Image: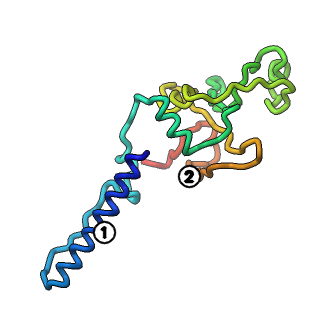
């Protein structure tokens, strides 16, 4: 992250220097050809996916850097599960008691985890974030969700969701199906 910020600063410095030098040319009456160059690394590039550099080797430091952007509760997190028989995906808080004795789901599948009287939430650690970033599970069962609302009712980030939300898309869980 620091390297990206340094590069952005360097780009800004070079743009200012370029404008300054062009100003000197204009003052001196020296003509120059100014051509508009499409910057493929621009934040406004039409094909954003071309800017993505796949990375498969994530460290705990990478996980910590990622978590700093999406900082939420660390005492609990949710994980995606995929029900093959129904073709649906759901997220559940990770709990040591999930489907074990005392779990309300064990006696009634319709019960919510919030009805549990003895939750034993699994804390979020760098290993879960690393697995999330690697994304090796075919059914995306390594995808995790953080709880952004902290116990003191504060929040450190906001997310805008621009995925495809047409009717039924949530059952397939394929984001941006309208992209070609």
Q: Residue 16's mark? A: 1
| Residue farthest along the top direction in this orientation | 101
Q: Position of residue 154 (x, y in %)?
A: 72, 49
At a point 82% along the width and 14% down the height, the residue shown is 101
First reached walking from the N terminus: tag 2 or tag 1: 1
Q: Which residue is nearer to you in this view: 65 or 112?
A: 65
Q: Residue 162's mark? A: 2
At a point 72% along the width and 43% down the height, the residue shown is 150
At a point 62% along the width and 24% down the height, the residue shown is 84
Helix, strand or loop for disc 1: helix
Q: Which residue is nearer to you in this view: 56 or 7?
A: 7
Q: Which residue is nearer to you in this view: 45 or 63?
A: 63
Q: Residues within 10 Å of mark 1 (few under 14, many from 20)?
A: few
Instruction: Name above or below for residue 76 compared with residue 151.
Output: above
Instruction: Name above or below for residue 137 compared with residue 66.
Output: above
Tell me if 35 is positioned left or right of 166 in this view.
Answer: left
Helix, strand or loop for disc 2: loop
User: For the residues carrying marks 2 and 1, which lies nearer the camera in this image?
Assistant: 1
Tell me if 127 is positioned left or right of 14 in this view.
Answer: right
Q: Which residue is nearer to you in this view: 111 or 173?
A: 111
Q: Position of residue 151 (x, y in %)?
A: 76, 41
| Residue farthest along the left direction in this orientation | 30
Instruction: Name above or below for residue 25 compared with residue 138.
Output: below
Q: Look at the image and tell me in which quarter the N terminus lies.
A: top left
The image quarter in which residue 106 lies: top right
């Amino acid at each position: 992250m620091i390297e990206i910020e340094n590069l952005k600063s360097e780009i800004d410095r070079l743009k200012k220097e370029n404008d300054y030098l062009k100003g000197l040319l204009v003052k001196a009456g020296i003509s120059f050809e100014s051509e508009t160059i499409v910057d493929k690394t621009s934040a406004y590039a039409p094909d954003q996916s071309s800017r993505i550099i796949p990375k498969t080797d994530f460290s705990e430091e990478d996980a910590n850097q990622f978590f700093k952007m999406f900082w939420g509760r660390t005492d609990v997190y949710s994980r995606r599960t995929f029900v093959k028989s129904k073709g649906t995906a759901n997220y559940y808080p990770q709990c040591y008691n999930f489907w074990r004795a005392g779990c309300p789901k064990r006696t009634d599948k319709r019960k919510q985890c919030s009805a549990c009287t003895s939750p034993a939430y699994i804390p979020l650690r760098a290993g879960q974030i690393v697995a999330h970033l690697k994304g090796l599970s075919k059914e995306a069962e390594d995808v995790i969700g953080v709880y952004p609302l902290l116990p003191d009712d504060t929040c450190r980030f906001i997310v805008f969701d621009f995925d495809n939300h047409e009717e039924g898309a949530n059952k397939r869980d394929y984001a941006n199906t309208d992209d070609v």
